[in-house]
Image: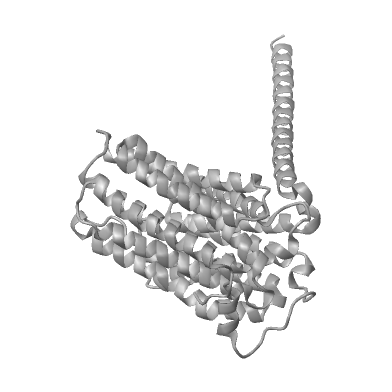
Amino acid sequence: MDRESAAASLARTRTRVRSAGQASSQAVRSAGRAISLTYQRMTGRIRRATHAHGAGESGLAKVIELQALHAAGDALVALGLAGTLFFDVPVGEARPKVALYLVITMAPFALVAPLIGPLLDRVRHGRRYALATTMLVRAFLCWVMADAVNDGGLALYPAAFGTLVASKAQAVTKATVVPRLLPPNITLVRANARISLAGTISALVAAALGVALITIGPEWSLRAAFCVFVVGMVLALRLPARVDSAEGEAKPQRRGGVADRSRALNGRVLVGLRANAALRGFSGFLIMYLAFLLRAQPIGGLPTATMYALVAGAAAIGSFAGAVMGSLVRARAPEPIILGLLALQTLATVASILWYGAVSVIALSFMTGFAQQLAKLCLDAIIQRDVGEAVRTSVFARAETLLQLAWVVGGIVGIALPGTSGEVGLSVGALALVLALILVIRTVILGRRPVHA
């Protein structure tokens, strides 16, 4: 009887184990199906978004996806380097250290304009390979930086510099590709905005991943960037063949290159450049001025850290809103939009002086991010529309260098201002915007004849 009971108990145990195993297996399969379905829905929505309005047929969708990888990789690199370069600076040394950092960040842009821009003009029939090369270089340098972060090697600094140069070269080359893949029912401003939106969203997702990775170690964020850039290299090589097509292009002249690039800066391009330089310079000024002002003079009784977060968040939301607005703009003449944004930025700055306080400063930060982003999209559209293929990459490189220089100069002015009140500091920025607005309006009145910048 005991043996029969034991056998029956063993049989029941086997049945329960078998049932539990089947239930576990079914749960695993169900979870797998749920994950697979979620992934398919997510990728399906992303694909529909990137391929909408003819972007899939024209090949623009691949550029959008490439920009997403570019932005994600850059975000991971930035997080991986956080805490290694010019951070944790004592308050007494903050101003000269930050000013030195701003000057150093100009170096990649100064190199891109006179060297990489003309070089990319020469190899414009190999744009896919140029884009793939920038991705491959950054992947290699990310691996080098990951090892250097681990062992404290000196290779970190030249590798970080090279990554900045390659990133800027990729951004300039990408901008020259867009007109060749533009669907007939999408304007250049909208196309640029969709590309920018994809980059912004991708950077936010990558930043969340990077924050999780750097808790393990900063090198892991850099190794993740390595993987992202390798995928980007493959995607760059899979861009449509017409990206490298010579159809409709004039052969670049070996002589007179500088003159050709100067003639390319017609009145419309010059208006866009000057207005964007003013907006970018004010952005650098506002960021740096507020960074030091809030330490010494909290606004509205809010803690400094809270105000920092609100100002930075408002600027980021404004930039995102500018990209969204750009994706909705249907106008094919971006010049009036740029002029309107410069005028609005000037009025917003004056209003923030008259009603100075936490709310006005946050609103001004939002407007600065919005105007800077949308105006840059319009400038890209003007260059893509008005500048010939033979010198377009060089003009983009010069434009990027000018805008970065404006940001650095504005930032240095913000750093150099003594501990004045917020109204006085913002008055300096407002005066600069008024002068820039007058200069831009004067350029419009003078006409559209070729002008040397």
Question: Which image quarter: residue 43?
Answer: top right
Nearest to the observer: residue 204 or residue 18: 204
The residue nearer to you, when weighing 319 against 206, is 319
Dividing the image into 4 quarters, which one contains the N terminus? top right
Residue located 21% across and 56% down the image: 90
Image x and y of residue 17, in percent: 70, 24
Give coordinates of residue 155: x percent, y percent.
41, 73
Q: Position of residue 84 (x, y in %)?
A: 35, 60
In this view of the protein, which residue sits in the foreground, 426 or 122?
Answer: 426
Identified at 64% across, 89% down, the residue is 254
Residue 87 visible in rendering: yes
> What colour scheme governs how the chains and residues are painted in the rendered image of this protein?
one colour
**Residue 140 seen by the camera:** no
In this rendering, the answer to whether 417 lies above or below 356 is: below
Q: Is residue 191 left or right of residue 161?
A: right
| Quarter holding residue 269 | bottom right
The mark total stands at 0
Give the residue at x 62% y 69%: 173
Return the x and y of residue 427 as percentages of the image width and height: 29, 50
Name, please, the residue furthest toward the top: 1
Residue nearest the observer in this picture, 345 or 200:
345
